[in-house]
Image (tube, rainbow, N blue to C red):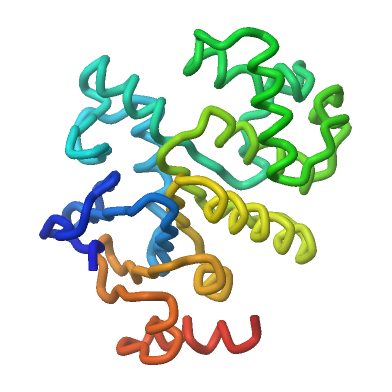
Amino acid sequence: MGLSQTDGDRLMTVLALSVAGPKGLIELTFESGETIALVGDVSQLGPEVSSLLTGSTKVGPKLVIDGVSATPAARMGREMIRRHLSMLRPVEEAPLNPRWKVLRILEEPLRALRPEMSKKARFETIASCLADLEVDVATLSAMPSALSASERQSVALARAVVAKPSLLAAVDPFARLEVEDQARLANQLLHLVSDSSVALLLILSDLAMAAHLADRIAVVSEGAIVEAGSAQDMRLIPRMNYSRMIAAATRSF
């Protein structure tokens, strides 16, 4: 299935993310444009993904791109991780510098990861990204404090994907958003995955949203995957109690 704790994926591997749990490593293998959701006991998984980006861990989590493994322990590994992995957090944790206008916020990852870009190319890339996410280009002149929670999360999403990562890890991205704003973000994520090659990892507690967005779902308990399958199978033929909760939750979505 390409979603396991011990065995590698038999399909063409685009990238694989391993995050450490109490019972070992949870290994996930993605195809381009695929969405995998982790649900259940996932509270420790977000910090593990974050540790890859910050370099705050030297063991455990790793990222594998086309068979090349990268860990934060080596400089080249850290650079590879920053180039290929990005993260979307809850809106209150969005990395939006309150002293910068949105344009500068969105330029930052391009300056860091695409230093060869001209100023004009950066602006065109940013404008194209906002158009894809249906965000008004006039937002570029705004300060974060002038934006609603939904608008800030849209900017955070644009910042996360403007440099075209291979994998976007979205950790509880719908938290603190109103229902209509959750629907907007869900549509943005669906369009993002369908219109690009980025893979999406969802780590969240909203079972109905996971089933709505994901191609595959893995149920995590005590740091281990206890059941995994396609989103449709998990809705129709769940085998374990927690998976049955997923099926029940989707009936009201």
Of residues 124 and 227, the one nearer the viewer is 124
The quadrant holding residue 138 is: top right
The quadrant holding residue 251 is: bottom right
Say which quadrant the N terminus sits in: bottom left
Of residues 33 and 44, the one nearer the viewer is 33
Say which quadrant the C terminus sits in: bottom right
In screen coordinates, is 102 left or right of 247? right
- Where's residue 86, x and y in %? 47, 36
The structure residue drawn at horizontal position 32% and vertical position 53%, both measured from the top left corner, is: 30
Q: Is residue 38 above or below residue 83?
A: below
Q: Is residue 128 above or below residue 20?
A: above
Q: Is residue 1 above or below residue 65?
A: below
The quadrant holding residue 146 is: top right
- Where's residue 182, x and y in %? 71, 60
Q: Is residue 153 visible?
A: no
- Where's residue 111, x and y in %? 56, 13
Q: Is residue 101 visible?
A: yes
The structure residue drawn at horizontal position 79% and vertical position 30%, both measured from the top left corner, is: 144
In screen coordinates, is 243 left or right of 29? right
Return the residue found at the far left: 7
In screen coordinates, is 10 left or right of 91? left
